[in-house]
Amino acid sequence: MKKRNLSIIVCLLAGQIFAQSLPQLGKDKVKDVIAAMTLEEKVNMVMGLGNATWSNPKDGKPTVIVPGAAGCTYDIPRLGIPSTVMADGPAGLRIVAEPNNAQGTRYCTAFPTATAMASTWNTDLEEQVGKAMGNEVLEYGCDVLLAPALNIQRNPLNGRNFEYFSEDPVVAGKMAAALVRGIQSEGVGTSIKHFAANNQETNRGSINEVISQRALREIYLRGFEIAVKESDPWTVMSSYNRINGFHSAENYDLLTTVLRKEWGFKGMVTTDWTSGTDWVNQMHAGNDMIMPGEQKQAEELLKAVKDGRLDEKVLDENISRILEYIMRTPRFKDYHYSNKPNLKENALTALHAAEEGMVLLKNDNNALPFKKVKEVALFGKTSYHFIAGGTGSGEVNYRHAVSLQEGLENAKYKLAVPLKNYYTNIIDSILGANTDAQKEFGGNKKFAIDRMSEIGLSENLIRTCAKKTDIAVITLGRTTGEGSDRKENNYFVLSDAERNMIQQVCDAYHAAKKKVVVVLNIGGAIETESWKNYPDAILLAWQTGQEGGNAVAHILSGKVAPSGKTAQTFPVKYADVPSSKTFPGEPSDNPINSFYTDGIYVGYRYYDSFNVKPSYEFGYGLSYTTFKYSDLKLSSTTFNDKMDVTVTVTNTGKVAGKEVVQLYLSAPQNTIEKPVQELKGFAKTRLLKPNESQTLTFTLNGRALASYWSGISSWVADAGKYEVKVGSSSRNIRATASFNLDKSTVIEKDHYALQPDRHVKEISVKM
Ligand code: BGC
C-alpha cells in the first residue's frame, strides 16, 4: 500500500516536472515551443477556431471569447499559448452589443467610414480616430481590429467602396498608415485588408482580376506598400479574389516575394474569412493563418504533411510568425480589460472626424452657413434616419446614431412640424412593423428605411413649408454593403422620386425667394451633374458615423467651417468611368475574369489625361473662407535623391478655416506613357484665423518621380523637366515650380512577379 502511494506521488511529481519543463511561449525560444507541438497541434495552430457558431476542434466546446468577434486563434495552454480575438472592422469595433449585459453594454462607437475619413485629408485626425478605436478593441477584450480596408475605389458601383479610402493610392496608403499607428498605439493589432485588388463584390471569391504588372505596382499595391512601410501593421489579410490566375491567399509572389522580401513585412498574414480553395498552397504562399478555420482544413493539411505535399518546415515557419503575433497581444500579456472604454470621449472624436470629412460641393451666393434661419423644413426620409455607415462586416453596433432632425434640434433650430410628423409617422410605422424589407435585411429594421424608395410629398405640403419656414434642407441617402455591387440605376443615378423632390422643393422655395440645401448622406460617388443646378448649396456629408446629425448641423450653422475635399471623382455620368465597360467582368451575368483595361488610368489619372470633365473633380471642396497660396519654393532646381517643397497658405477670408493642400507632379514622358499629373503628397493646415498663415513642407523622394517598367521590373525616373503643382484640387492648381532630373535613373529594382495570365489591352492616350 505504502509503495503504491509512493509511486503515485512520484508519477504526479514527474508529470509536474514534465509540464514545467515544457517550453512556454514568451519564456522559451519560439522554435522550442514549436518543436514541442504535435503535428495535429501544428495544423490546428495555422487556423482559427471559427466564430461564435463554430466549436473548438479540441473539445467541441463553443469558442466564444467576445460575442460577435469575427474569429479567434487556436490555443495550446500546455505551451502557454492563449487564444486571441480578432474583430471587425474599419469604421469601429464590431462585436455584439448586449444592452443588459451585467459586464457592460458593449456598444461601440461608429466612426465615419473610411471614405469620409479620407475626405478629411488629415492624417493626425485619422491617427486620433485609430487611438479611439484601439481603446475600444482593448477594453472590450479583443486583440486585433480587422482594419483598415484600403482597396482602390476603381468603380463607383463597388458595394464596399464606403469601407475604402480613395481612388488614389497615396491617399489610401497614408490614411491607412495613420489609422494603423493610432490603433496600435493602444497595444492592440490591425489587419490591413484586403490584400490585394479586391475591387468588386460580384463573385469576389472566385473572380480573376487580370491586371498589368504596372497597374498593380502603381495603383493596387502602392497603398499597401505605403501602409506596411510607414506603420508596421501586426497582420495583413489576403483577399478573396484571384490576381492574374492565383487566389491572393495562394499567391507566393504577392505574399512572399512582394510583401515580405521587397517591403520587409515581418508580421502575420491571414486569409479573408473562408477564402480560396487550396489550403496547402496557402501555406506555401506564406499565408500563415487560415480564417476563421474549419476542421476539414486541418485534416487536409495533416494529410498533406503525411503524404509529402507539405513540408513540416513550411508549417513551422508560418507558426513562428503566428506565435510572434500572439506574444504582442493583450491577451497574451494577460491584460484585464474593463468592458468600459471611453465611449464619451470617443463620441467626441467621431464628431470632429465627421465634421472634418464633410465636403461643401456648392455654395451659391453664400447660401451657407445659415443666416437668420430660425425654422427649417427638413425633407427626405434620410433626414430623419441618418445613415451612419454601410452594411456587412464594416458595420458597427452603436447605441444611437444622431439624425439630422436631432442634430438641428440640438443646435436649437425649429423644424417644420407638419413635415416632421409626416415623415416620422411613416418611418415609425415601418420600424414598428414586420415588413418584407425588414425580413430581407435580417430583421435589422434600420436598413428597411435606408433601402426603401424616397417618400412622396404633396405639392400642398411643400408649398406650405415654403411659406412658413426660412430654408429647406433635403437629405439624399445611400446604403451599400458587403456581398454585392450596385447597379447604375438603383444607386448611382437618382430615382424619379428623389429628382421630383429636389425639383419641387427648389421650385417652391425659389419662388418664395428662399434657399435650398441638399445634404448627401452617401457612401460613394453618385450622379450629380443633372440636378446640381437646382439647389443653392450641396453638402457632401458621406456616411458620417453615429454623430452625423450633429456634425451636419455644426456645418450648416457655421459653428464649423467645412474643410473636407473629396478623395474620389464624381463623374458626369457612369459611362465616363474608365472601368464602366469592364466592371464587374466577363461574362457580365456571372463574371469569371475582370479585365483591367483601364490600367493605371484610375480616377483623376484618367479624367485629367483623357480630358473628360467630371462633375466634381478629385480633391475638390469649398470652404466658408478663402485661402491664398504663396512662396512656393523648391530646395533645388535639380533633383538629387530628394526634393523639399514649401508653400505658404494664408486665410484671406472672414472666418477661421483649414485648407487641404495637394501636391501633384507632372513628369516628363520620354520613354513611358504617364498620367498628366499624379498626387505625390498632401497636407492640411491647422485652423487658420483670418490673415493667419502656415508654411507647409513636402518631401519628394526618388519613387515619387518614378513609374514602374514591367519589362525590367523596375521603378524608373525619366530624365527631364518635372513640374510641381500645388493646388486646392486636382483642377485648381494655385502655384507651380519645376526642377530637372539630369539623367534617367533606375530608382528601385524589384522581382519579376505577378505577371498577367493573359494579355490585357490597356487604354492609352495615344490610342
Ligand atoms: C470580409 C472581411 C472581414 C471578415 C471577417 C469577410 O467577409 O471580407 O473584411 O474582416 O469577413 O468578418
Image (cartoon, grey):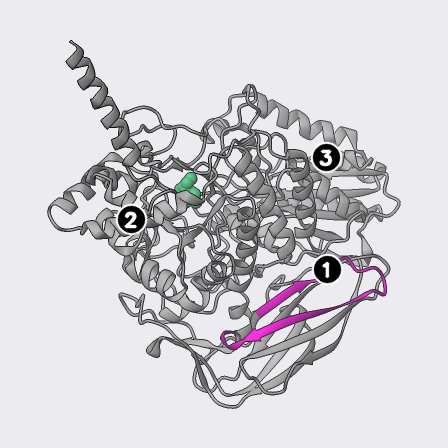
| Residue 497: % across, % down | 61, 41
Marked residue nearer the N-terminal end (3 or 1): 3
For image coordinates 34% across by 52% down, the residue present is: 241
Quarter of the N terminus within the rendering: top left
Q: Residue at x 64, y 34 (%)?
A: 343
Q: Which mark is residue 585?
A: none
Residue annotated with mark 1:
622
Figure quadrant, ligand 1: top left
Label 1: how many Cα within 10 Å (few below 14, some 14–19, many 20+): many
Q: Could you say where residue 496 lies in the image, as x and y percent from the top left?
A: 59, 45
Say which element carries label 1. Answer: loop
User: Which type of secondary structure does the marked residue at label 2 adopt?
Assistant: helix
Location of the C terminus by quadrant is bottom left
Residue 31, numbered circle: 2
Q: Position of residue 646 (x, y in %)?
A: 69, 74
Range of magenta residues? 680-703
In this picture, is 555 found above or below 342? below
Tell which of 728 and 347 is nearer to you: 347
Closer to us: 125 or 556 = 125
Q: Amino acid at mark 1?
A: Leu
State left or right for residue 232 relative to residue 470: left
Residue type marked 2: Lys
Classify mark 1 as within 8 Å of ligand 1 or not, answering yes or no: no
- Magenta stretch: residue 677 in it? no
Q: Residues within 10 Å of mark 2 (few under 14, many from 20)?
A: some
* Residue behind mark 3: 405
Separation (CA) of disc 3 from disc 2: 60 Å
Horizontally, residue 337 falls left or right of residue 125, namely left
In percent of width and height, residue 175 lies at 56, 56
